[in-house]
């Protein structure tokens, strides 16, 4: 049989017992590169420190910021409003009602340390585990920086200048922010009360926020230290009339050369024309005393037209001419009532850090 025939030939060399000398020679290959090695990297001794160092890389932070930009923008916008005291309960602004009694106002500075604490409180929401705490500690600076950048952009829009470049890590805005709280019937009676702030050179200071916190409480934030404030009636329309004392302040009757007051500007506080007697005893520029009807006869030197022409000729050189309806209307414009408040600004104190 075949089995016996094979047995008679004796043992045959197999592939497993073939001598190495009889194998077919092959071309040697280069050793494997380290990149293709399948050996695992040793674990980090401190994974948290390694992750922190990884996220500290500016390029990594930029990638994280770019990847979460869509979600970060609305959060940064909301936090920027928080820096302007939006969504802050009134009890945190005025802890005791006696600090802001009726018919009073208070001026002060917005403390950057208090703003930082406000951001920390908002960002602490939802931290219920060590993982969330680690993530908050790693991304908190990114969120705070985006919030301060959004606040800087909002301020630059109000100032009409280009926003500052984004920097990391973000620092509190060095510009001083001042605040005004008014509790008065003025706020209730005039919901659109006009509040303006001015520096030492009578240059207006931008208003960062003006909001009614209640029917009688008004909050204003300014981007600078005001030397004076004006509270005025809202200018809803053009009105004609006299002041409370029955006089009319003279205004620049025409456009003059460079350096002269602009058309319609009040000349001086002393340059006034008496029009009516508040007591109703004298006729002045009225047809009859106590009637309230103006005498507009240009031929009468005691009429409103005659009194205005004589006063303008004396106050403004080369203004002798017959006053027409437009000239009389210009002089009779009644400006909104304005209250001027002078301040004595003191430099802000350094914040106390616990």
Image (cartoon, rainbow, N blue to C red):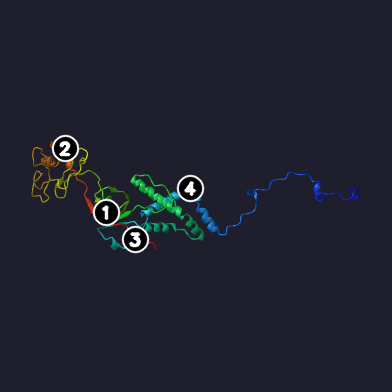
Q: Which one is earlier in the sequence, the residue at label 2 or at label 4?
A: 4
Image quadrant occupied by the C terminus: bottom left
Which mark, residue 187? 1
Label 1 crowding class (10 Å Cα cut-off): few <14, some 14-19, many 20+?
some
Which mark, residue 91? 3
SS under mark 4: helix
Location of residue 328 by image quarter: top left
Decide: is 180 above or below 316.
Answer: below
Q: Which one is earlier in the sequence, the residue at label 1 or at label 4?
A: 4
Residue at 45% x, 50% y: name it: 72
| C-alpha separation, residue under disc 1 versus residue under disc 4 | 44 Å
Give percent across and percent down for residue 146: 43, 51
Residue bearing the label numbered 4: 66
Give percent across and percent down for residue 172: 39, 54
Q: Nearer the viewer, mark 4 or mark 3?
A: 4
Q: Nearer the viewer, residue 178 or 26?
A: 26
SS under mark 2: helix
Q: Is residue 310 visible?
A: yes
Q: Which one is earlier in the sequence, the residue at label 2 or at label 1?
A: 1
Q: Is residue 192 left or right of residue 54?
A: left
Residue bearing the label numbered 2: 325
Numbered disc total: 4
| C-alpha separation, residue under disc 4 versus residue under disc 3 | 38 Å
| C-alpha separation, residue under disc 3 versus residue under disc 1 | 19 Å
- Residues tagged 3 and 2 counted as in contact (Cβ below 8 A): no
Label 2 crowding class (10 Å Cα cut-off): few <14, some 14-19, many 20+?
few
Q: Is residue 65 left or right of residue 240?
A: right
Q: Is residue 193 visible?
A: no
Label 3 crowding class (10 Å Cα cut-off): few <14, some 14-19, many 20+?
few
């Amino acid at each position: 049989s075949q089995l016996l025939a094979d047995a008679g030939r004796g043992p045959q060399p197999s592939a497993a017992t073939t001598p190495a000398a009889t194998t077919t020679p092959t071309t040697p290959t280069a050793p494997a590169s380290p990149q293709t090695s399948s050996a695992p990297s040793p674990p980090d001794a401190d994974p948290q420190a390694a992750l922190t160092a990884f996220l500290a890389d500016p390029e990594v932070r930029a990638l994280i910021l770019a990847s979460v930009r869509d979600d970060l923008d609305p959060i940064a916008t909301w936090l920027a409003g928080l820096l302007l005291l939006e969504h802050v309960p009134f009890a945190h602004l005025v802890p005791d009602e006696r600090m802001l009694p009726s018919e009073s106002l208070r001026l002060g500075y917005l403390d950057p340390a208090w703003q930082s604490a406000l951001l920390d409180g908002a960002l602490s929401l939802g931290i219920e585990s060590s993982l969330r705490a680690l993530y908050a500690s790693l991304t908190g600076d990114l969120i705070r920086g985006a919030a301060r950048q959004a606040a800087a952009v909002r301020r630059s829009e109000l100032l009409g200048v280009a926003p500052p470049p984004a920097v990391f890590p973000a620092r509190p805005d060095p510009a001083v922010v001042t605040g005004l709280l008014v509790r008065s019937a003025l706020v209730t009676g005039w919901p659109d009360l006009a509040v303006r702030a001015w520096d030492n050179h009578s240059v207006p200071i931008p208003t960062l926020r003006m909001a009614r916190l209640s029917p009688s409480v008004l909050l204003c934030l300014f981007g600078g230290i005001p030397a004076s404030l004006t509270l005025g009636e809202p200018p809803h329309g053009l009105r004609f009339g006299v002041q409370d004392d029955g006089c009319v302040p003279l205004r620049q009757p025409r456009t003059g050369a460079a350096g002269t007051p602009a058309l319609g500007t009040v000349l001086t506080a002393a340059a006034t024309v008496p029009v009516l007697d508040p007591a109703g005893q004298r006729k002045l520029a009225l047809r009859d005393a106590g009637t309230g009807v103006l005498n507009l006869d240009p031929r009468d030197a005691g009429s409103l037209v005659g009194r205005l022409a004589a006063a303008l000729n004396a106050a403004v050189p080369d203004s002798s001419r017959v006053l027409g309806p437009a000239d009389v209307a210009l002089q009779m414009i009644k400006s909104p009532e304005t209250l001027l408040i002078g301040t004595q600004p003191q430099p802000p104190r350094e914040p106390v850090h616990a």
